[in-house]
Amino acid sequence: MLPKPTPRPTTVSMPRRTALLAAAAATALAACGGGGSSSDEPPAEPVGQVINSSLRSEATGGSYAIRVYLPPAYATGTATLPTIYVTEGDALYGSSGLAPTRFDTFKQVMQRRGTQAILVGIGGTAQRGTDFLLPGAAVYLNFITKELAPSIERKYRADPKRRALSGLSHGGYFVVAALVIEGMAGALSFSHYLSTESSVGGHGDARAFLAYEKQLDGKPLPATLFLTGAINGNTVLIVNPLYTQMAAQSNPGLTLLRAEYNASHVGADVPAFEDALQRFFP
């Protein structure tokens, strides 16, 4: 269960990010004298569609709640759209049962921005200790790439060449592990890997985690890796050393980016997602 984030981002050594503000609706009741009155309020803006389902995985043996958000223009359009796969879609941003989930929070950001992309929230936060860490991470990755993504692309106009994978903490580690696993195999399933506040996974410490990633040195990686962290989180001990090591490596095709925010460990999640939308899915 995630505590409520404090989205007050400050990007360091990166282009200035446009601040995102929630639109405030202001309506007034029109009063008319005499024989009657009328008030014609403007119709509500379309907010898109959310489809809830579940998918049982042959790879992991588990069943996962799947929530798909389609932007408003999807219903009347014909173009294929990029797809953002969000781990821990059912995790709560707060201790209350009424707190929004990671999926709902990201959906609201996309609605506010008018982002033309499909959002896929993957449930199963209770299995994060198995699914996100090795050796389970390789099996869970097969579920996403071999079962979930093909299912999404059969049902919706989702572009298989524009897939993003997003994770926070152990989920952020999983995103990096997915890049290592696929990079070593020579075939990447995602165009964008969005790792926020990565943990060291099950490696025990940052040194062992860096040694694991070092296997990628020299491997072609035709994708974008966006490493983000919190000033008051894992930036100094994990995110920055990982970025520094990867920046010194030879990985043809890799676009490596880093940003950090004036936030807590969990609080960095929303500004990092907003930043990713602005950079990659404007």
Image (cartoon, rainbow, N blue to C red):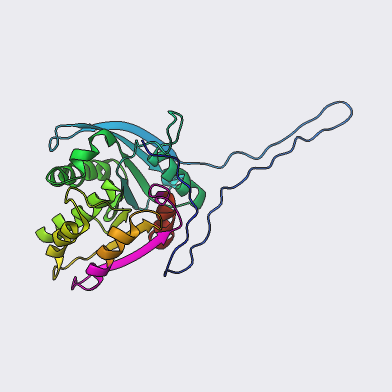
Residue 163 at x, y percent in the picture: 28, 53
Residue 235 at x, y percent in the picture: 34, 59
Q: Residue at x 15, y 45 (%)?
A: 142
- Where residue 221 sits, quadrant-wise, is bottom left
Q: Residue at x 74, y 34 (%)?
A: 39
User: Within the magenta stretch, is there residue 256?
Assistant: yes
Q: Is residue 235 left or right of residue 221?
A: right
The answer to whether residue 232 of the structure is visible from this angle is yes
- Where residue 75 sits, quadrant-wise, is top left
Residue situated furthest left in the rendering: 185
- 218 or 45: nearer the viewer: 218
User: Within the magenta stretch, is there residue 163?
Assistant: no
Q: Residue at x 33, y 55 (%)?
A: 234
Q: Residue at x 44, y 30 (%)?
A: 96
- 10 or 206: nearer the viewer: 206
Give the position of the N terminus as an image quadrant.
top left
- 109 or 134: nearer the viewer: 134
Magenta residues span 244-269
Give the position of the C terminus as an image quadrant.
bottom left
- Where residue 162 sits, quadrant-wise, is bottom left
Q: Is residue 217 left or right of residue 105?
A: left
Residue 239 at x, y percent in the picture: 30, 60
The answer to whether residue 226 of the structure is visible from this angle is no
Vertical order, 110 against 90 (above or below): below
Residue 26 at x, y percent in the picture: 68, 42
